Image (cartoon, rainbow, N blue to C red):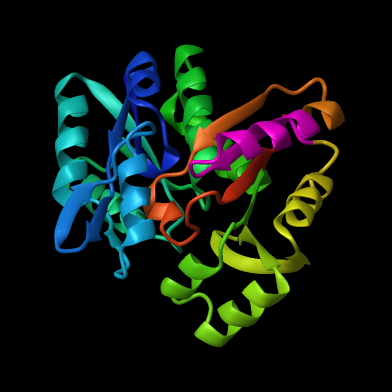
Amino acid sequence: MAKIQIVTDSTAYFTKEEANALDIKVVPLSVHFDGQVDSEGFPGEFEAFYKKLESSDSFPSTSQPSIEAFERVFESALDQGMEVICLVISSDLSGTYNSASAAARLTNPKKISVIDSRTSVANLKLLTKLAVDMVSKGKTRQEIVSYLERQKKKVSVSLTVDSLEYLKRGGRLTGAQALLGSILNVKPIIALVDGRLVPVAKVRGKGKALEKMVEDIAEDVTDITICHILNDKEALQVKERLEKRFPDISIGLDEIGPVIGSHLGPKAMGICTMTRID
């Protein structure tokens, strides 16, 4: 049975230590900011970016990994006699899936499977970890891909922000909408629906937005992760609330990096959930 290399992109937000321990290859997206281009990096490395974002009048842009970046990872695995499963951020949020798919076609499509996860952040991370676990249990590439294609439909992501400034800068709110929302202390709740970020509710105050996000979690959920941007204190408060409601679930805590976080801004919060299929 062929060994299988699991590959993902940087928006899964594995730490370096996690990626090394699980033998996951992480292909980074890039951030363009004030004339400088950098790889997104790993959790624990994001603070300088967000401090710059707070103080700068300009707004960053992001770009998918190159086809060549995926080719290098794929070829390395194939040279070691391995097959490849690559899970990436939703194709409606980034062109990363297109780059990975093109690289697979140019390398060896018979031994490489690329999955459009239709999600990102902690849920992409969790799907990737499930793939690693299935590899350890001796499942074939086809079995793992079939399972993940079904499992990815049972995830949910909801997000809210501390300030409307970054949604305005990223073009998701007009200046008038941001001003009125700030005056009224309205916080949007944004969800990943069918792979796209869409506004699903508006709530007065961030505390009430977080309350609604917690209340809206399905009862049959099996995995919960709180995602945040430089906001450990509030994340721990939400974690405590979730532990009371779901005492049998281990609640995770993850950071959100620049590719996703630049549109949300410092102190943004998210809740990622998954309900595992049989």
Identified at 82% across, 28% down, the residue is 246
Query: Considering the image in quadrants, where does the C terminus appear?
Result: top right
In the image: residue 214, left or right of residue 66: right
Q: Residue 46, how many percent across, how many down?
A: 35, 41
Q: Residue 112, relative to residue 270: is it above or below?
A: above
Q: Which residues are magenta?
A: 221-242
Marks counted in the figure total 0
Indicate yes or no whether the magenta region holds residue 126: no
Depth check, front residue: 85 or 268: 268
Kindly indicate the quadrant of the structure image that contains residue 132: top left
Q: Residue 213, how many percent across, how many down?
A: 75, 50
Depth check, front residue: 235 or 118: 235
Q: Residue 25, relative to residue 98: is it above or below?
A: above
In the image: residue 250, left or right of residue 82: right
Q: Residue 117, how many percent across, how many down?
A: 49, 47
Kindly indicate the quadrant of the structure image that contains residue 214: top right
Q: Is residue 110 visible?
A: no
**Which residue ends up furthest to the bottom in the rendered image?**
176
Identified at 56% across, 40% down, the residue is 227
In the image: residue 149, left or right of residue 170: right
Indicate yes or no whether the magenta region holds residue 226: yes
Kindly indicate the quadrant of the structure image that contains residue 62: bottom left
Identified at 31% across, 48% down, the residue is 49
Identified at 72% across, 75% down, the residue is 184
Q: Residue 22, relative to residue 70: is it above or below?
A: above
Query: Considering the image in quadrants, where does the N terminus appear?
Result: top left
Depth check, front residue: 231 or 149: 231
Q: Is residue 252 visible?
A: yes
In the image: residue 41, left or right of residue 251: left
Q: Residue 154, how many percent across, how many down?
A: 67, 44
